Image (cartoon, rainbow, N blue to C red):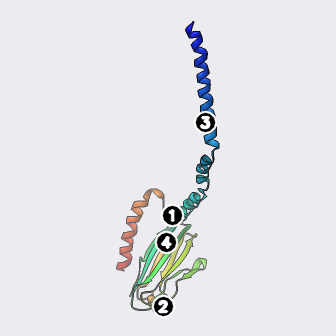
Amino acid sequence: MGASFKNPYLIGALVIVAVLVIVGAYLYLASPGYGDQEEEPQAGTPQQEAKEAQQTTGEVMEVKVRLYEWGIEPSEIRVPPGTTVRFVIVNEGRYTHAFEIEREDIGFEASSKTLGPGQDDTLEVTFEEPGTYEIYCPIGNHRALGMEGVIIVGEGGGGSAGASDEAKDSTQQYEGISY
Ligand SMILES: [Cu+2]
């Protein structure tokens, strides 16, 4: 008998608890505080922007180029097609130099400023067309003296061989310097 009395109380208590939980949850969800919390990720448009910035940074390959008597280093640069390269060009020599990229068959040409000793410049180029681009110093006979090299835009930059590509690159850079 007692149980039949207790049960309605128990059920009533459970219903009240359930209602409180639901109301509490509703109030919590609807509260300005919760709204703010949800807006932060939405204001995470900053987060999205940051992501995009990172992606952009990831797509831009920065290459430091040293100009000196008589050479350009690195003398061989390999990039996958579509890569945007930001060349940071520094004249570390005692003569005036410049950095020019040229590919005659597609009529491509880009050049840094003429740089006095110690000066630097930045050149940003997106390489769409696979092939070999020449790099050289256009001043005087500097190219003939050794201030030249190549940028190879290749499709074979297959993802799996990333590490070995790097190893290859450094070897080829040394080969480039030696001749
Ligand atoms: Cu030069």
Looking at the picture, does residue 23 appear above or below residue 74? above
Judge depth for marks 4 and 2 and give the one in front.
2
Residue matched to label 2: 139
Task: Pinpoint residue 163: horizontal percent, then vertical percent.
Answer: 40, 60
Badge 1: residue crowd in 10 Å (few <14, some 14–19, many ≥20): few
Task: Give the residue drawn at x 41%, y 88%.
Answer: 145
Tell me which numbered mark, 4 or 2, is placed earlier along the sequence: 2
- The quadrant of the rendering that contains the N terminus is top right
The amino acid at mark 3 is Gly
Q: Distance between the residues labelled 4 and 2?
A: 23 Å
Q: Distance from label 3 to label 2 (Cα)?
A: 77 Å
Label 4 vs label 1: CA separation? 19 Å
Q: Name the residue under label 4.
A: 152
Q: What is the quadrant of residue 47 in the picture?
A: bottom right
For the residue marked with disc 1, what is the amino acid? Gly
Which secondary structure lies at badge 3?
helix
Q: Nearer the viewer, residue 144 or 78?
A: 78
Report the mark closest to the observer, 2 or 1: 1
